Image (cartoon, rainbow, N blue to C red):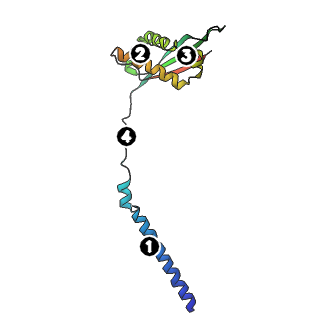
Amino acid sequence: MSFGKIVAALLGVTVLAVGVGAGATWWFMKGGSAIASAEAAPAPKEEEPVDDRIYKYVSLEKVIVMLRGVEGEPAPHYLALDLVFKSPEEDEKATREQLPLLRSLAVKELSTLTMDRAGKMTVEELTATMEKAFADRYAKDRADRPFTDVMIGKLIVE
């Protein structure tokens, strides 16, 4: 082997060693060891309790309200919707018994809407409005709601 090849090989090994050393130093300074990585890793979140209750879905169909329009409009406007209540199986009967109250609350809340406002509301916004109206009433009566969720099964704004 010639002297030039030996020098080039030694120079290459030296550059490689310096590179590995610099990389290792950077890795350990930023906390790259397995121990530091394990310590820095966030603790696993506690799992939320699984709701293993059986649910029934109770329908409240054909809630229809006339929407307030602009004065002088020739045709009346209305909103029709079907509500669905997600109720634990043991509370299904109580939910069914309270359907007249729930219908009344829905009509009361929805009758305040104008055609313009109702037409611009998303299903999520309308659901949140219904949810709040029911929650407020049950809080006022200091009673437990026999359902967990309110959903909209059908919606017509005309």
The image's mark for residue 47 is: 4
Q: Which residue, given by chain and number where applicable, does mark 1 sit on?
A: 21
CA separation in Å, label 2 and label 4: 30 Å
Return the disc, 4 or 1, that comes first in the chain's sequence.
1
Q: Could one spot residue 20 in this view of the protein?
A: yes
Q: Nearer the viewer, mark 4 or mark 1?
A: 1
Question: Do the residues under discs 3 and 1 have CB atoms within 8 angstroms?
Answer: no
Which residue bears the numbered disc 2? 95
Front residue of 85/4: it is: 4
Identify the mark at residue 120; answer none if there is no mark.
none
What amino acid type is highlighted by mark number 3? Leu
Q: Residues within 10 Å of mark 3 (few under 14, many from 20)?
A: some
The label nearer to you, 3 versus 2, is: 3
Tell me residue 53's x, y (percent).
38, 27
Q: Is residue 57 left or right of residue 73?
A: left
Type of amino acid at the residue the image marks with label 2:
Thr
Residue in the foreground of this view, choosing between 88 and 80: 80
Give the image location of residue 57, x and y in percent: 46, 20
What secondary structure is marked by label 1?
Answer: helix
Left or right: 123 with respect to 28? right
Comes first in the chain, label 2 or label 4:
4
Query: Tag 3, which secondary structure?
Result: strand
Query: What x and y, as percent, mark residue 66?
Result: 57, 9
Q: Position of residue 8 (x, y in %)?
A: 55, 85
> Viewer-nearest of labels 4 and 3?
3
Mark on residue 81?
A: 3
Residue plotted at (48% across, 21% down):
129
Visible residue check, residue 57 = no
Q: Which circle's residue, 2 or 1, is located before the other in the chain?
A: 1
- The answer to which of marks 4 and 3 sits earlier in the sequence is 4
Label 3 – label 2 distance at C-alpha: 18 Å
Name the kind of residue labelled 1 in the image.
Gly
